[in-house]
Image: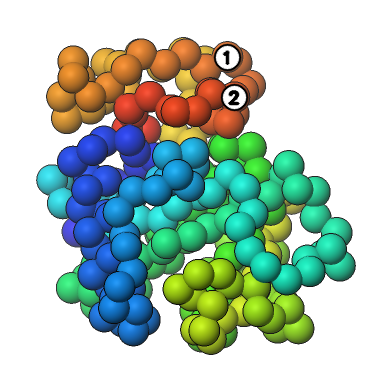
Amino acid sequence: MSVAFELSRDPHFLAQYYEMRERCFRKELGIPHFDGSEDDRDRQGFILLALQGDRCLGGVRIATSLDMDGDIGELDLPPDGCCMWERLVIDPSVRDRTLQLRRDFCHRLIGASRRCGYQHALVLSSLRNARFYRQCHSAMGVDFRIHRQLTNCARGPFANIEHCLSVADLQDKAPVSMTAAVLPASLSSEEIGGRDIGAQVSHCSIPQNATMRDLPPPYPAYRITLST
């Protein structure tokens, strides 16, 4: 299975991702009225998608601000250097039969978050999922700590669901090899590549050594492929 991982603003794929997270969260998390449609945190953040041809296999939001309850001051993290990984979902039809896809997704998520300029990523998940994430991070030499003492951090429809807070240390002490995660100094619509370049992909210039966060929101439509 050939899968591409992309930071994407392509409406065609985003629509599939939003529908998938709504369907899965309603069924698997028991939140019957969960609204998976696009919200402000989607528009202000970055969306990493796993794509196979014209199909979205999964996605996750790299949120640009922390949105959680509870006191995390004891973690001593720089607020401007932290993102949150949210709304992670992989299509159930491929999730259980390809462990490598989930590992690859974790790999690309680390690289994409680094490229967006973050040193730490916070994630709320079940303890079972947190342990799986820790295994994936450890295999890549990335520190991933589960803070079981910090509870009651989730908000809204997730508040009553079992969860724990984990933190990934994204600092380049053990760099993840991602060739295309380092973007060229200038990206044109042709270089980015969109399904409909004229209608969906805007010109976007990124100064040398800048991060994705140096682009002011709302971000232009783009598809940036991350590959090993």
Q: Are marks 2 and 1 in contact (CB under 8 Å)?
A: yes
Residue 107: percent from left, percent from top: 48, 56
Q: Residue at x 49, y 39 (%)?
A: 44
| Residue 148 appears in the picture as rendered | yes
Q: Residue at x 13, y 45 (%)?
A: 54
Residue 66: percent from left, percent from top: 64, 54
Question: Does 95 sit above or below residue 121?
Answer: below
Mark sitting earlier along the chain (2/1): 1
**Is 21 on the left-hand or right-hand side of 196?**
right
Q: Amino acid at mark 1?
A: Pro
Residue 86: percent from left, percent from top: 48, 60
Q: Which residue is mark 2?
A: 214
Q: Residues within 10 Å of mark 1 (few under 14, many from 20)?
A: some
Q: Residue at x 52, y 84 (%)?
A: 160
Q: Amino acid at mark 2?
A: Asp
The residue nearer to you, when weighing 1 against 164, is: 164
Distance, label 2 to label 1, CA atoms, is: 9 Å
